[in-house]
Image: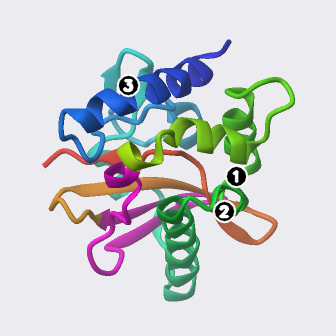
Amino acid sequence: MGRRQIALVLMAVMLPAALAAGCGGSDSNASGNSEKTKPTTESEPTKFGTRPGREVVNFGEEADQGEREAAFGDLEENYRAREAGEWAKQCASMTLEQSEEVRETTEPDGTCASGLRTQASPLAKSKAFRAYPIQGPIEAFRVENDRGFVLYQGKDGNDYAMAMKKEDGKWLVDDLIPTKLPN
C-alpha cells in the first residue's frame, strides 16, 4: 500500500473523530500531493512527506479569465456533488489518478463512487465536512502546464488551495482535501 493509499485510509478512519470533535475541515493535505505539484519554493514537512503551503500563491502564472471560470466551475461541480452525496458525479469531476486512488481504498472490485461513499459514512456525521466550503468567487487560479491550484476563501475565513489537473481539455480536481494555506 502506497503513501497516498495509507493517507486515504487514515483520512477515512480519522474523519468521524474530527467531525465528532467539531472540526469542519482539515489543515493538511491527506493525500500527499507534493510529487504532482512540484511547488517552486519551500514546502511544509508533514508525516507523509511535504505538502504545498503558501508557495502555491506564486505557483506558475495566473490563468486567464476563461480558464479561471472553467476551473471554478469544475471545482464547484466536485464540491456540490460531494455535498449532495452524488459520488459518481464527484468521481467524474476528479482526475483519473485521484479516482483510481479512491477506488483502491475499497474492495478489489469497488469503484471510486463506492470508495467515496464508504469514506463519507455515516452520512449524517460527515454532513458538516461535505458542506460546500467556498465563500464567494475564487481568488486566483495559478497554472503551470496542465497543473494548477484554485485559491479561495473558505466559509470558515481561512484561505485554501485545491490541486487541479487538466485532462482531455477539462480542469479536474486532483485531491480530496484542499490545502489550508498558512496566514
User: Which residue is drawn at the image coordinates 61% and 43% (left, top)?
Assistant: 116
Q: Check disc 3 and report the residue beneath it.
A: 14
Q: Residues within 10 Å of mark 1 (few under 14, many from 20)?
A: many
Q: Secondary structure at mark 2?
A: loop
**Comparing labels 2 and 1, the label whose residue is closer to the camera:** 2
Q: Which residues are magenta?
A: 127-152
Along the line of sight, which residue is nearer the eye, 59 or 178?
178
Q: Check disc 1 and report the residue beneath it.
A: 95
Q: Check disc 2 and report the residue beneath it.
A: 93
Amino acid type indicated by mark 2: Ser
- Magenta region includes residue 145: yes
Residue placed furthest toward the right: 109
Q: Are marks 2 and 1 in contact (CB under 8 Å)?
A: no
Q: CA distance from mark 3 to mark 2?
A: 24 Å
In the rendered image, the vertical position of residue 1 relative to residue 75, given as above or below: above
Residue 100 seen: yes
Q: Is residue 13 left or right of residue 85?
A: left
Amino acid type indicated by mark 1: Thr
In the rendered image, the vertical position of residue 43 relative to residue 126, given as above or below: above
In the rendered image, the vertical position of residue 88 relative to residue 118, given as above or below: below
Amino acid type indicated by mark 3: Met
Q: Are marks 3 and 2 in contact (CB under 8 Å)?
A: no
x, y percentage for residue 8? 54, 28
Q: Is residue 112 left or right of residue 171?
A: right
User: Which residue is drawn at the image coordinates 75% and 38% (left, top)?
Assistant: 100
Along the line of sight, which residue is nearer the eye, 130 or 166?
130
x, y percentage for residue 108? 83, 24
Q: Is residue 54 left or right of residue 2?
A: left
Q: CA distance from mark 2 to mark 1?
A: 7 Å
* First along the sequence among labels 3 and 1: 3
x, y percentage for residue 78? 56, 64
